[in-house]
Image: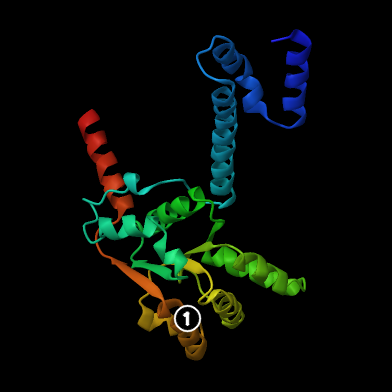
């Protein structure tokens, strides 16, 4: 390739932000000049490098923006330890069909049984398929909504939360929810109802939600909207945390 043309090509790729095409230019130029591939094939190869890189970067950014507490997939989940969880059902959730129908998922079970792991795994799958996703603990969500209300920007915050194709609300019922919290939570659930999918994790049986949400009428309205188009996964079994603790204790015994 003519040296001046080569330099101008590199400069153009820089200006256009096509870093991967620039990086692989020499490699592809050698293939085309040697006759190993045609010009069109070489151009496709260069653009493939760029597309693959941008695709990977886009997925990484979407996953990072979701604010997951950790990034885990179903491959990391011990289904043998938690046999009450149907692996095929979880795989089906990760195919994201429930989102096409604006359905919800509720993971119900005691602390440590893997609810957050499973919810996050589905969320990671959604984010990797370019669905804007957001993970937040229930108490943090309510604090955000109360702060937004005090600052006269509640509508804006609710709209921002509603734009997520998948919202994951973790640990409902772990901390007290007062009357104001209940009303704010209802507004969000009502806004997303039959339009967007939400995943919930909770350790509170549905019959006790009126105690969690302060007002039985509000609790009933929230539950009706959550459960109307919903998959409920009731997880029974031992705590993963206790499992890990027992494993560590056994390791310590072996070492001593």
| Above or below, comparing residue 14 to residue 193 in the picture | above
Q: Residue at x 47, y 70 (%)?
A: 102
Q: Is residue 256 left or right of residue 148?
A: left
Q: Residue at x 22, y 35 (%)?
A: 253
Q: Is residue 233 left or right of residue 19?
A: left
Measured as percent of width and height from the top left, residue 186 is found at 56, 80
Label 1's element? helix
Q: Nearer the viewer, residue 15 or 188?
A: 15
Q: Which residue is mark 1?
A: 225
**In this figure, what is the number of numbered marks?**
1
Position of the C terminus, as image quadrant, is: top left
| Above or below, comparing residue 32 to residue 140 in the picture | above
Q: Residue at x 26, y 55 (%)?
A: 87
Q: Quadrant of residue 17?
A: top right
Q: Residue furthest bottom?
A: 217
Measured as percent of width and height from the top left, residue 36 is found at 50, 14
Position of the N terminus, as image quadrant, is: top right
Measured as percent of width and height from the top left, residue 98 is found at 41, 66
| Above or below, comparing residue 15 to residue 4 in the picture | below
Res. 255 in view: yes
Q: Residue at x 73, y 9 (%)?
A: 2
Q: Quadrant of residue 96?
A: bottom left
Measured as percent of width and height from the top left, residue 66 is found at 56, 52
Q: Is residue 190 left or right of residue 9?
A: left
Look at the image and name its color scheme.
rainbow
Q: Nearer the viewer, residue 144 or 211?
A: 144
Res. 256 in view: no
Q: What is the crowding at mark 1: few (fewer than 14 residues within 10 Å), some, or many (at least 20)?
A: some
């Amino acid at each position: 390739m003519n040296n001046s043309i080569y330099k101008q090509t590199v400069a153009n790729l820089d200006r256009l932000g096509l870093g991967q095409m620039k990086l692989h230019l020499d490699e592809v130029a050698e293939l085309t000049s040697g006759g190993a591939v045609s010009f069109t094939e070489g151009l496709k190869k260069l653009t493939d490098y760029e597309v693959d890189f941008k695709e990977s970067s886009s997925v990484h950014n979407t996953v990072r923006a979701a604010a997951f507490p950790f990034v885990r997939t179903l491959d990391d989940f011990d289904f043998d330890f938690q046999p009450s969880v149907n692996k095929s059902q979880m795989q089906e959730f990760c195919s994201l069909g429930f989102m096409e129908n604006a359905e919800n998922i509720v993971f119900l079970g005691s602390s440590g049984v893997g609810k957050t792991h499973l919810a996050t795994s589905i969320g990671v799958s959604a984010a990797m398929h370019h669905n804007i996703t957001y993970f937040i603990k229930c108490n943090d969500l309510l604090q955000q909504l109360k702060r937004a209300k005090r600052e006269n920007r509640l509508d804006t915050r609710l709209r921002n939360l509603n734009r997520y194709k998948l919202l994951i609300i973790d640990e409902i019922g772990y901390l007290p929810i007062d009357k104001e919290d209940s009303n704010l939570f209802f507004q969000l659930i009502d806004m997303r109802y039959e339009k967007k999918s939400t995943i919930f994790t909770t350790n509170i049986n549905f019959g006790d939600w009126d105690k969690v949400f302060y007002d039985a009428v509000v609790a009933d309205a929230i539950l009706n909207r959550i459960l109307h188009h919903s998959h409920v996964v009731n997880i029974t079994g031992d705590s993963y945390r206790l499992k890990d603790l027992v494993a560590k204790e056994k390791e310590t015994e072996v070492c001593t």
